[in-house]
Amino acid sequence: MNKSIAASAWSGMIAMMFMFGAIISWQIFPPPSPSLPMAEWAAHFTENRTGVFVGSVLMCIGSSLFFPFFGGFYGCLKVAEGKHTPLTYGMMMIVPFGFLPLFLVMICFVTAAYRPEMSTEMTAALADAGMFLLVIPGFIGLVQWVVTGIIILRDVNPQPIFPRWLGYANIWVGILAAPGSFIPFFKTGPFAWNGVFAFWVPVFTFGMLLTAVLWAMLRAAKHPAMQLDQS
C-alpha cells in the first residue's frame, strides 16, 4: 500500500470534521436568510463572538488539512492522466484559488465580531462579505470538478486508478456547484445564499463526493501503478 496516499485520504476526512465544526460554531448552519434585518444580522456576530473566533480557528485548521488531501488526490490523477499531465497541473493550481475565499471568510467573520462597538452597518457588511465568499465560488468548483472527472474518465492505465463512476460523480458535482455564483442577484428563493440550489445541493453533494474520493483514494493506494516508486 502507498501509505502517503492513504494518509492524504484520512487528512481529508479530518479536515471535513474541522470545517463542519467551524460552520456549527459560526451558527450559520442552516444559513440565515439574506433578507434578515441588518441589525439582527449584525447582532448574530456581536452576540456570538466566542463562537465566531472558535469557528475561525477550526476553519483554519480544517482548510489547511485539505492541502495534503488534494496533494494525494492529484498525485493519483497524475498517474491516471499519464506522461503528460496538463489537466492535473491545472487542477493543482486551482485548488489554492478555491481555498483562498475560505481564508477570507475567516477574516471577514472575525473582523465583524472583533469590535462589538463597530457600527451595525459595518458589521453587517463584513458578515455579508463572509457569506458571499463562502458560497459564491461556484464556478471555481465547476471547473475543478468537471476537469477532474474528465481526467478520471480518460485514465490511460489498463486498470484505472479510480472507478469510472467517480468521474461522472465529479462532473455532476461541478455542475451542481455552479448556482452558488449567482447569489448576488437573489435575497430569497432557491438561488439565495441559503437556497436549495445555491447552498444545500452543493453542500451535500460536495460532502458525498469527498467521502467517495476518500474511499477511492484508499482503494487507489493499493493500485499496482501507485507502488512503482515504493521501496
Image: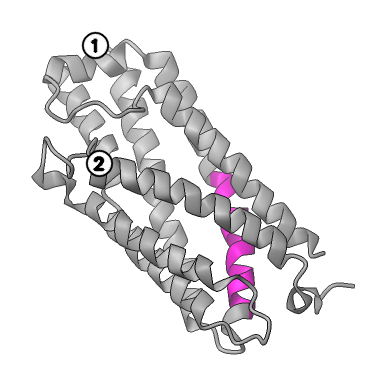
Residue plotted at (13% across, 38% down): 189
Q: Give x and y (percent) for residue 95.
A: 46, 60
Examine the structure image and report whether residue 74 is included in the region drawn in magenta: yes
Label 2 crowding class (10 Å Cα cut-off): few <14, some 14-19, many 20+?
A: some
The vertical placement of 179 against 191, above or below, is below
Residue type (three-letter) at the residue carrying disc 2: Val
Q: Give x and y (percent) for residue 97.
A: 39, 58
Image quadrant in which the N terminus is located: bottom right
User: In the image as oriented, which residue stretches furthest toward the front?
Assistant: 165
The magenta region covers 64-79
Residue 225 location, quadrant: bottom right
Near-viewer residue (168 or 48): 168
The vertical placement of 196 against 220, above or below, is above
Residue 181 appears anywhere in the view:
yes
Q: Which mark is residue 3?
A: none
Label 1 crowding class (10 Å Cα cut-off): few <14, some 14-19, many 20+?
A: few
- The residue tagged with tag 2: helix, strand or loop? helix
Near-viewer residue (124 or 185): 185
The vertical placement of 120 against 69, above or below, is above
User: In the image as oriented, which residue stretches furthest toward the right?
Assistant: 231
Disc 2 marks which residue? Answer: 196
Examine the structure image and report whether residue 66 is included in the region drawn in magenta: yes
Mostly what secondary structure, the magenta segment?
Answer: helix
Residue plotted at (44% across, 22% down): 25
Mark 2 or 1, closer to the camera: 2
Disc 1 marks which residue? Answer: 117
Residue 190 location, quadrant: top left
Q: Give x and y (percent) for residue 74.
A: 58, 68
Residue type (three-letter) at the residue carrying disc 1: Glu
